[in-house]
Image (tube, grey):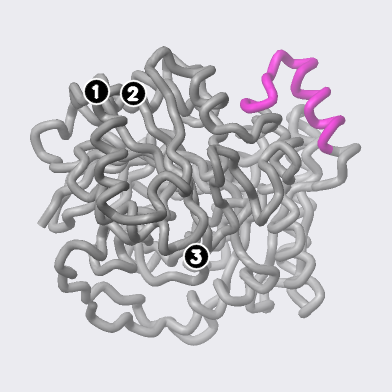
């Protein structure tokens, strides 16, 4: 069985690609960034390590990826640089680190994820049919995306050659795709392949399956996994006890997460909002936390309670201002907010015995893993594309969902809650 080492730039992306391998019959184990040194393949052939490198400085992102890849250079058959499906972050530094660490001169890049609306046509990236630069990510609060040409985005971050391969070049036959790949490998650097639909991913996987390094988003991993014999998978969810509850942490400010919270609230789910402007003064912070603890106790008999950060534009602007006045950068302020939300959730979970958690947002998911001391996890059954149920390696009764903020349908939180509470065992693959 092919051993694959994945270096993922954030925790929700790590879960995302772990799920792709799981769905293709290959159980995977995932280690969040604070526990990267503990990572090992164990009894799994697919190992995913979160480098938490999307929003750090490029040289630090390079170092983290390089060290992880070098550590497993003699153990893995294939290396995968898992990146944000809209190319946010230190793309060039992380791709370069992987090539430098493996000694490979070339890597194909496949960013398309059609099931979540990400497609690439003639090198231009789209989100649900809208150019990336015109999509919701144009005004991302931490990493605004003002360019749709993937070659331009990557070329600005690497000195290696970058080119794109249009679907028109390889649509006629698989043989033409093989020929194009060989031509691009001679040039070295990176070749970004168009993806219109899942059929394109399937065809690309057939040609790329033996490449030592692959870069991009998670979707192609499913098709790569399908080209290997399935492994036995008997991991299941522990049966729920009566009276189980779910706690949802929502730090994401994306329209998708906002719609999911609104739907949950409309169905009767209590939603408690953390006032982020209160977090940068110790006295006001403690008062705000106590307010939310009391509010939670009033709803402790509810099947699910949502803890969210304030999404009002004026509150977001004021939060950034207060952080800046204290010399705190925008990424650091976002982490501080996520840490506060995770800390509150941990206190409430300890008090109320909650062991089922839904987390919305990459930064919030990272904070959750740190605060709940999740050293490693097994990726379990899918809820919706790109999002699974995970189980802590240290605590088999701690089950959680780590969702990218921009993933999921309007009814996602309801689906995730039901999946956590049904406690059914998975069938063997």
Extreme residue toward the right, this view: 314
Q: Secondary structure at mark 3?
A: loop
Asked if 79 appears above or below 228 in the picture, the reply is above
Disc 1 is placed on an element classified as: loop
- Please tell me which residue lies in front, 81 or 395: 81
- Earlier residue among tags 3 and 1: 1
Q: Depth check: 323 or 91 in front? A: 91
Q: Quadrant of the N terminus?
A: bottom left
**Magenta stretch, overall SS:** helix
Name the disc covering residue 385, or none: 3
**Reading the chain from its start, which is encountered first: label 2 or label 3?**
2
**Closest to the observer: 209 or 253?**
209
Q: Nearer the viewer, mark 2 or mark 3?
A: 2
Q: Position of residue 227 (x, y in %)?
A: 21, 62
Give the extent of the magenta segment: 316-332
Label 1 neighbour load within 10 Å: few <14, some 14-19, many 20+: some
Q: Bin the neighbour count of mark 3 within 10 Å (Cα to Cα): few under 14, some 14-19, many 20 and up.
A: some
Q: Which residue is mark 2?
A: 189
Q: Quadrant of the C terminus?
A: bottom left
Question: CB of mark 1 within 8 Å of CB of mark 2?
Answer: yes
Count of numbered circles on the image: 3
Measured Cα–Cα span from mark 2 to mark 3: 30 Å
Query: Rounded to the nearest whole Å, what is the CA distance between mark 1 and mark 2?
Result: 6 Å
- Residue highlighted by disc 1: 105
How far across and how far down the image is residue 69, in percent?
Answer: 23, 30
Check if residue 202 falls in the magenta segment: no
Q: Of the residues tagged 3 and 1, which is closer to the observer? A: 1
């Amino acid at each position: 069985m092919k051993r694959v080492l994945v270096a993922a730039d954030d925790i929700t992306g790590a879960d995302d690609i772990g799920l792709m391998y799981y769905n293709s019959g290959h159980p995977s184990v995932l280690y969040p960034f604070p526990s990267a040194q503990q990572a090992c393949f164990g009894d799994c052939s697919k190992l995913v390590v979160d480098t938490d490198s999307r929003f750090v400085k490029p040289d630090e992102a390079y170092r983290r990826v390089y060290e992880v890849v070098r550590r497993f250079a003699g153990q893995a058959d294939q290396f995968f640089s898992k990146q944000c499906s809209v190319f946010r972050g230190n793309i060039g530094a992380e791709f370069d680190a992987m090539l430098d660490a493996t000694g490979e001169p070339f890597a194909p890049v496949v960013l398309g994820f059609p099931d979540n609306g990400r497609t690439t046509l003639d090198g231009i990236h789209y989100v649900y049919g809208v150019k990336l630069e015109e999509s919701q990510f144009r005004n991302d609060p931490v990493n605004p995306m003002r360019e749709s040409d993937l070659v331009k985005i990557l070329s600005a971050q690497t000195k290696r050659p970058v080119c794109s391969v249009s679907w028109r070049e390889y649509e006629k036959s698989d043989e033409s795709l093989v020929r194009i790949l060989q031509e691009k490998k001679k040039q070295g650097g990176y070749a970004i392949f168009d993806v219109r639909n899942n059929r394109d991913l399937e065809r690309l996987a057939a040609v790329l399956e033996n490449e030592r390094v692959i870069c991009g988003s998670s979707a192609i991993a499913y098709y790569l996994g399908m080209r290997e014999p399935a492994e036995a998978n008997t991991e299941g969810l522990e049966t729920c006890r009566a009276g189980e509850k779910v706690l949802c942490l929502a730090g994401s400010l994306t329209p998708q997460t906002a719609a999911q919270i609104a739907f949950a609230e409309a169905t009767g789910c209590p939603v408690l909002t953390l006032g982020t402007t209160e977090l940068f003064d110790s006295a006001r912070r403690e008062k705000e936390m106590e307010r939310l603890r009391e509010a939670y106790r009033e709803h402790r008999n509810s099947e699910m309670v949502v803890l969210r950060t304030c999404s009002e534009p004026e509150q977001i602007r004021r939060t950034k201002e207060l952080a800046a006045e204290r010399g705190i950068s925008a990424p650091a302020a976002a982490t501080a907010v996520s840490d506060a939300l995770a800390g509150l959730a941990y206190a409430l979970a300890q008090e109320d015995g909650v062991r089922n958690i839904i987390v919305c947002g990459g930064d919030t998911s990272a904070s959750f893993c740190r605060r709940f001391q999740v050293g490693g996890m097994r990726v379990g059954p899918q809820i919706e594309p790109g999002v699974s149920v995970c189980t802590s390696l240290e605590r088999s009764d701690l089950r959680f969902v780590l969702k990218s903020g921009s993933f999921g349908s309007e009814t996602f939180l309801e689906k995730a809650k039901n999946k956590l509470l049904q406690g059914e065992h998975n069938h063997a693959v």
